[in-house]
């Protein structure tokens, strides 16, 4: 399917704030969560964060703006924003202020924002924030016109400090429900549409075009390394064999790289989501369902990652922990 079928338009999204002309490379301080490989101290690296915020307004009340001011990722992909546009604009404006006053003197330019609201009220919603230049924005996946599929996929073409242009997508895959055939059908339909777009991105990257990274909550734990209680969840959505088979295809057939797993190696976890039930968070009974899948050349530039798990349950601003990866591009 040709690239033109995506709803493309030149960058016209909202821009908030302004900052200095130059920026220091971000250096993440001691993380309360998992740190994989020492952070790279070379020049011209960028940080990409993905985080399911579990409702941006609730996250704001719980301290996400403070987190933004401390970490200021160059590119920030958010999922489950679940808010009307006026609230989103106000909160993102606050993020821009936090960026502008950061000790790291971020902001190679203004903080550019892109988002799409789900047409089903109170559901989904994705966003993409960048303090690097956004050249083009795209919304949605080809062939998915149902309301329930909106607010789940957006792309930016972004110019990096080294002059490369990369495609970054913020992705929120349906959760599904193994006891609800309709919800599982919606999930598989979305995953099928993803294959089409991933094939396009793979082919473009393989022929000297833009490299790409897909960031988000994919609602699938790929292997038993990605879930604490694998056996008990074999018949639950998120760990069904037919769901996990899609990730196999992304890695094997479509040649994307699970960047965090590539950096961490074959260890148990680290996890990015913990159920609200019981003491799952305190006992680290989690799932790894938040990923960054990159085309091979971009994946090779990855220098380290951080999963910033909150130090205590009460200090969380989401049931997911942010995943940040540093790339030398």
Image (cartoon, helix red, strand yellow):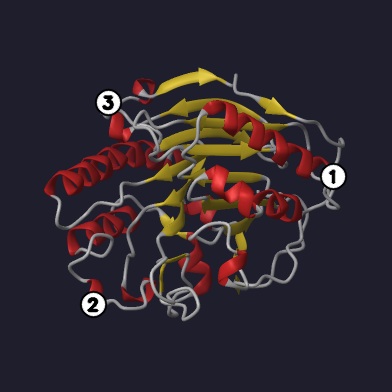
Q: Is residue 65 visible?
A: yes
Residue identified by numbered label 1: 101
Q: Position of residue 69 (x, y in %)?
A: 75, 50
Looking at the rendered image, the quarter that the N terminus falls into is top left
Q: Nearer the viewer, mark 2 or mark 3?
A: 2
Q: CA distance from mark 1 to mark 3?
A: 41 Å
Depth order, front residue of 289/203: 289
Q: Residues within 10 Å of mark 1 (few under 14, many from 20)?
A: some
Residue identified by numbered label 2: 232
Depth order, front residue of 167/13: 13
Residue depicted at 75% across the width and 67% down the height? 29
Q: CA distance from mark 2 to mark 3?
A: 35 Å
State the image quarter where residue 202 is shown.
top left
Residue depicted at 71% across the width and 64% down the height? 40
Question: Which mark is first along the chain, 2 or 1?
Answer: 1
State the image quarter where residue 177 is shown.
bottom left
Q: Residues within 10 Å of mark 2 (few under 14, many from 20)?
A: few
Depth order, front residue of 314/322: 314
Q: Is residue 166 visible?
A: no
Residue depicted at 23% across the width and 42% down the height? 192
Q: Position of residue 259 (x, y in %)?
A: 49, 60
Q: Secondary structure at mark 2?
A: helix
Question: Which mark is first along the chain, 3 or 2?
Answer: 3
Q: Secondary structure at mark 1?
A: loop
Asked if the residue under mark 3 is in contact with the one under mark 1, i.e. CB atoms within 8 Å, the reply is no
Q: Secondary structure at mark 3?
A: loop
Q: Position of residue 263 (x, y in %)?
A: 53, 69
Residue identified by numbered label 3: 145
């Amino acid at each position: 399917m040709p690239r033109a079928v995506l709803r493309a338009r030149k960058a016209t999204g909202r821009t908030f704030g302004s900052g200095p002309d130059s920026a220091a490379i971000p250096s993440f301080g001691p993380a309360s969560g998992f740190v994989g490989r020492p952070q790279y101290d070379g020049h011209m690296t960028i940080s990409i964060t993905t985080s399911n915020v579990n409702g941006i307004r609730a996250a704001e009340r719980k301290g996400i703006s403070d987190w933004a001011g401390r970490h200021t990722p160059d590119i920030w992909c958010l999922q489950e924003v679940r808010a009307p546009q006026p609230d989103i604009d106000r909160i993102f404006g606050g993020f821009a202020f936090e960026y502008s006053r950061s000790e790291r003197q971020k902001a190679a330019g203004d903080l550019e924002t892109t988002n799409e609201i789900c047409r089903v009220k109170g559901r989904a919603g994705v966003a993409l924030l960048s303090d690097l230049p956004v050249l083009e924005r795209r919304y949605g996946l080809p062939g998915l016109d149902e309301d329930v599929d909106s607010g789940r996929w957006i792309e930016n073409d972004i110019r990096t400090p080294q002059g490369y242009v990369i495609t970054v997508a913020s992705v929120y895959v349906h959760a599904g429900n193994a006891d609800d055939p309709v919800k599982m059908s919606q999930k598989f339909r979305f995953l099928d549409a993803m294959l089409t777009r991933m094939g396009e991105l793979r082919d473009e990257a393989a022929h000297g075009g833009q490299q790409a990274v897909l960031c988000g909550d994919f609602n699938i734990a790929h292997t038993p390394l990605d879930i604490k209680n694998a056996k008990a969840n074999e018949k639950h959505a998120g760990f069904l064999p037919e769901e996990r088979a899609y990730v196999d295809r992304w890695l094997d057939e479509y040649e994307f790289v699970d960047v965090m797993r590539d950096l961490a190696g074959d260890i148990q976890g680290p996890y990015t989501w913990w159920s609200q039930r019981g003491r799952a968070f305190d006992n680290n009974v989690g799932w790894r369902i938040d990923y960054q899948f990159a085309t091979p050349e971009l994946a090779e530039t990855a220098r380290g990652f951080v999963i910033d798990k909150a130090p205590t349950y009460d200090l969380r601003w989401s049931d997911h922990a942010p995943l940040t990866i540093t790339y030398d591009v």
